[in-house]
Image: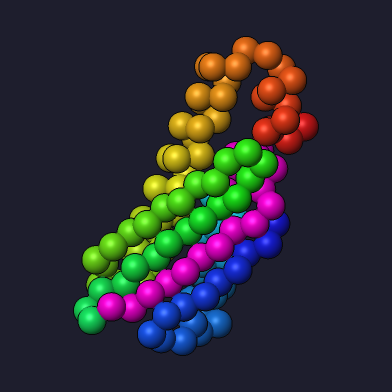
Amino acid sequence: MNVLISSRNFDVTPAIQEKIENAVAASITDKNLKISSVRVVTEKEKLNFKVTITVSTKGHEFVSTVDDDDDLYRAVDKAVAKIENQMAKAIDKIKDIHHDNVRIADVLED
């Protein structure tokens, strides 16, 4: 899994980069999805931070955006929580709609 972190209007410090990588790795690897890449874009506006997380898997792309948070670490936590919910819902939909094990095996890891 590749984690690409980029920023707009400010520099990402090693502490911020470590926080983002740890939060993403801890939450996303639990889902048993075949994740090809994770892209995190942090943006500083006048007073707030915006975090966009894009997770690319086989057959799905999940996007989570959090706006208007004055603390970057809180914005990252909110975005990670949001993307976890999106991925959990997608897994539930796959299991509910496709009762065929072959379709579920295409998306889920062994």
Question: Relative to residue 70, is residue 80 drawn left or right?
Answer: right
Question: Relative to residue 51, is residue 97 drawn left or right?
Answer: right
Percent position of residue 38, x then y: 59, 58
Q: Residue at horizontal 43%, vertical 62%?
A: 52
Q: Quadrant of the C terminus?
A: top right
- Count of all numbered marks drawn on residues in the image: 0
Identify the image quadrant of residue 48: bottom left
Question: Relative to residue 60, is residue 102 drawn left or right?
Answer: right
Percent position of residue 101, x then y: 71, 17
Q: Which residues are magenta?
A: 28-45
Percent position of residue 100, x then y: 68, 14
Q: Residue at horizontal 67%, vertical 41%?
A: 58
Is residue 19 covered in magenta? no
Q: Which residue is situated farthest in the right direction here? A: 110
Is residue 33 covered in magenta? yes
**Way the structure is coloured:** rainbow
Q: Which residue is situated farthest in the front direction here? A: 59
Q: Is residue 99 above or below residue 4?
A: above
> Is residue 26 in view from this perspective?
no
Q: Residue at horizontal 51%, vertical 56%?
A: 54
Percent position of residue 102, x then y: 74, 20
Q: Quadrant of the N terminus?
A: bottom right
**Who is closer to the viewer here, 23 or 54?**
54
Q: Is residue 42 above or below residue 103?
A: below
**Who is closer to the viewer here, 63 or 25?**
63
Q: Which residue is situated farthest in the top direction here? A: 99
Q: Residue at horizontal 40%, vertical 48%?
A: 82
> Is residue 64 in view from this perspective?
yes
